[in-house]
Image (cartoon, rainbow, N blue to C red):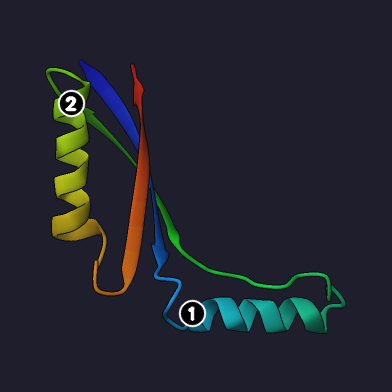
Amino acid sequence: MRYTAHINIMPLKELLDPQGKAVSSSLHNLGLTQVQDVRIGKHITLTLDAANKDDANTLVQDACKKLLANQVMEAFDFTLVEG
């Protein structure tokens, strides 16, 4: 069965996000002062083949833990779509 994983990787809330701070400051400079907080992360989409949704879930978690996300500084979540 083929699955598509939509993975979101974000800096941990406890850590400073320099990119987010720079974007937030720039938005304020452009007059968009209503913006309170900006966090910059990554969105990754990958397609994989697995026997079932549980196997696909395990594969995506392994990919995130071993390569895609630095768990010391980042948190991840994902959704799986069949087809």
Amino acid tagged 2 = Asp
Amino acid tagged 1 = Asp
Instruction: Confirm whether residue 6 shows in the render.
Output: no
Precedes in sequence: disc 1 or disc 2:
1
Q: Is residue 44 left or right of residue 55?
A: right
Q: Is residue 37 left or right of residue 57?
A: right
Snapshot quadrant of residue 42: bottom left
Q: Is residue 33 left or right of residue 60?
A: right
Distance in Å between CA atoms under marks 1 and 2: 33 Å
* Image quadrant occupied by the C terminus: top left
Percent across and percent down for residue 81 are 37, 25
Numbered tag placed on residue 8 in the rendering = none
Percent across and percent down for residue 22 are 61, 83
Residue depicted at x 46% and y 63%: 41
Residue on which disc 1 sits: 17
Residue depicted at x 83% and y 70%: 34
Outermost residue toward the front? 14
Label 2 Cα crowd, 10 Å radius (few <14 / some 14-19 / many 20+): few
Percent across and percent down for residue 71 are 24, 67
- The answer to whether marks 1 and 2 mark residues whose Cβ atoms lie closer than 8 Å is no
Percent across and percent down for residue 44 are 37, 48
Snapshot quadrant of residue 11: bottom left
Secondary structure at badge 1 equals loop
Q: Is residue 66 above or below residue 51?
A: below
Label 1 Cα crowd, 10 Å radius (few <14 / some 14-19 / many 20+): some
Residue on which disc 2 sits: 54
Q: Is residue 73 above or below residue 67?
A: below
Q: Is residue 19 left or right of residue 75?
A: right
Number of marks? 2
Instruction: Confirm whether residue 47 shows in the render.
Output: yes
Q: Nearer the viewer, residue 46 or 60?
A: 60
